[in-house]
Image: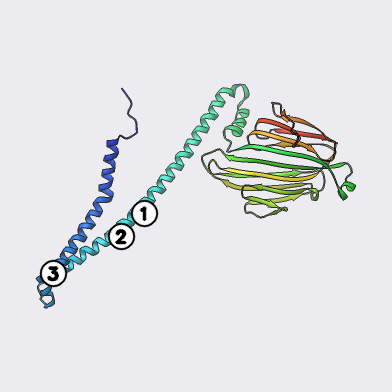
Amino acid sequence: MTARTNIPTAEELIDRFSKYLVGRWLRPRLFFSLSAFFGLTLLFIFYYSELYNHYRAGSAWASVYLVREIGLSLIVAALLGAFVEAYNQRRHQHHVDALTLELDRQHLANTTSLVSAIKKNTLQAVYGNSLGKAIVDSAASQILEARFKRKRWRIHFNVSPLEGELAEQYPRAVKLTICMIGDLYNITSQEQLLSSSFEIDSDYPQETIKIDSFQVGLLELIGNKVIREHEGFSSRPKCVLISYSLCVPPSGRVAFKAKYSYISGVADSEVLVSKFPTDAMTVFLQCTSCNAEFSISELHLKKALRSDDIVEGQKWTLKGVLPMQGMIVSWTT
């Protein structure tokens, strides 16, 4: 015995369409058309027959006036009925569209919640006994429940000597220039709010921190001044914090780009991590007008792969980066 599917056959589709055509389109339009036809017919009989002559002669015969009034009434009823039917159909269709959209939204939310629960329960069943509930819940929240993913995350890291007054004021310091480029993707089927922050921390005064550019989608920061809505900029001694918030459509992409510089010691380190799951993180290390020695420490179980580039310097790539994983870049000049 074969199970009956929910896909309608051609005969069922034709039958449904015929019922809809008769019930929602032909029946009211047929009524209005007949009303207008009979109304025009009665007016034609009235004006092109002996009844009109009686009317002009002032006859008191009731049928003379009755025929004309019935004809006019039928025409007015047909016109009013047509307008009311058109309005009701538009209102009905609007209600149906709104109801369908709400049902789709609820179905999508329920499906997403169910799938997330199934994934979490599967992870708990497989690793719960060995790792514990706290660790499994943390892994599920960072991976299975992630709303955004980062792709093509490239970080250009440059060390150069200070110049001018800064070199005299801080003789045991260098200038770090960092440029970050990547794309953030909404990996869900619903619109998501991307709300995050970007922090630049330094051991030197805050005025030595310079932001050349900072852009997340349509949000842009120029000269430490906010020029877009839903973006915040705040600073405290030795630190700059940029907070941003924007809505990302389903499967939407948001371009991220930041370039900034600040002062650091001649022998120091910088922690580079991602707040979002990342397919691959690539760090380029360069030094300008100085002899700097770099070293990499992975905040990851895997080792970063090195493949030097003549133009962009040392190239370190780390694949499969989870939130708050990355690299520690150390240098000595």
Against 320, residue 58 (above or below) is below
Q: Are marks 2 and 1 in contact (CB under 8 Å)?
A: no
Tag 3, which secondary structure?
loop
Tag 1, which secondary structure?
helix
Q: Which residue is mark 1?
A: 91
Q: Kindly report the distance in space between the C-alpha atoms of the residues bearing marks 2 and 1.
A: 12 Å
Q: Kindly report the distance in space between the C-alpha atoms of the residues bearing marks 3 and 2.
A: 30 Å
| Residue 206 percent coordinates (x, y) | 79, 49
Q: Residue at x 9, y 71 (%)?
A: 50
Q: Earlier in the sequence, mark 3 or mark 2?
A: 3
- The disc placed on residue 83 is 2
Neighbour tally class for label 1: few under 14, some 14-19, many 20 plus, Cα within 10 Å: few
Which three-letter amino acid code belongs to the residue tagged 1? Answer: Arg
Q: Of 304 and 243, which appears nearest the observer? A: 304
Q: Residue at x 57, y 32 (%)?
A: 144
Neighbour tally class for label 2: few under 14, some 14-19, many 20 plus, Cα within 10 Å: few
